[in-house]
Amino acid sequence: MTDATDLFFNVFRNKNRFRILKLLSNKELCASELQKELMIEQTNLSHDLKCLINCQFITVRKNGRKRIYKISPETKELVEEVSKHIKKYELYLKKCNIIKEEENEEI
């Protein structure tokens, strides 16, 4: 059985999901706006949005025929802190041979 910590980090590990969260940190967006920014297939976007909704990292509301996505306040705060951390430690993350080895093992 996978524990909640593993599940939590699996959400953030997916590049598209994290990019969605970063975009939604700036403003609410509909699916077509997200797809245009991310340049990914609709099916992949739908899958990632459903995951983020199920995990309650984002919410969705209808506005006419459009579905508008919004990041939760707690998730927004977390994404902003993670983004700052990434920016601050980017050089060290890229130099870390252990991370590189782990990435190669997953391929």
Image (spheres, grey):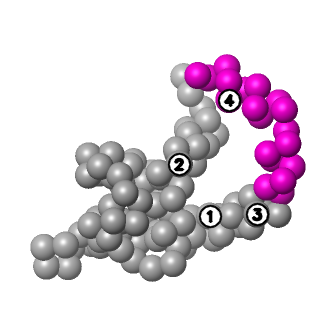
Query: Circle 2 is placed at which residue position?
Result: 15
> Per the image, is 49 magenta?
no
Residue type at numbered disc 4: Glu
State the mark number for residue 79: 1
Up-down relation of residue 99 to residue 11 (above or below)? above
Label 3, residues with CA under 10 Å away: few <14, some 14-19, many ≥20: few
Specify start and end residues of the magenta stretch as a single range. Answer: 89-107
Q: Are marks 2 and 4 in contact (CB under 8 Å)?
A: no
* Secondary structure under the numbered disc 1 in the rendered image: helix
At x 41%, y 72%, the residue is 70
Q: Position of residue 48 (x, y in %)?
A: 38, 49
Q: Which mark is residue 26?
A: none
Residue tagged by mark 3?
87
Q: Foreground: 64 or 35?
A: 35
Name the residue beneath numbered marker 4.
Answer: 103
The amino acid beneath tag 1 is Val
Q: Earlier in the sequence, mark 2 or mark 4?
A: 2
Q: Residue at x 52, y 44 (%)?
A: 14
CA distance separating discs 2 and 4? 14 Å
Q: Which amino acid, mark 3?
A: Lys
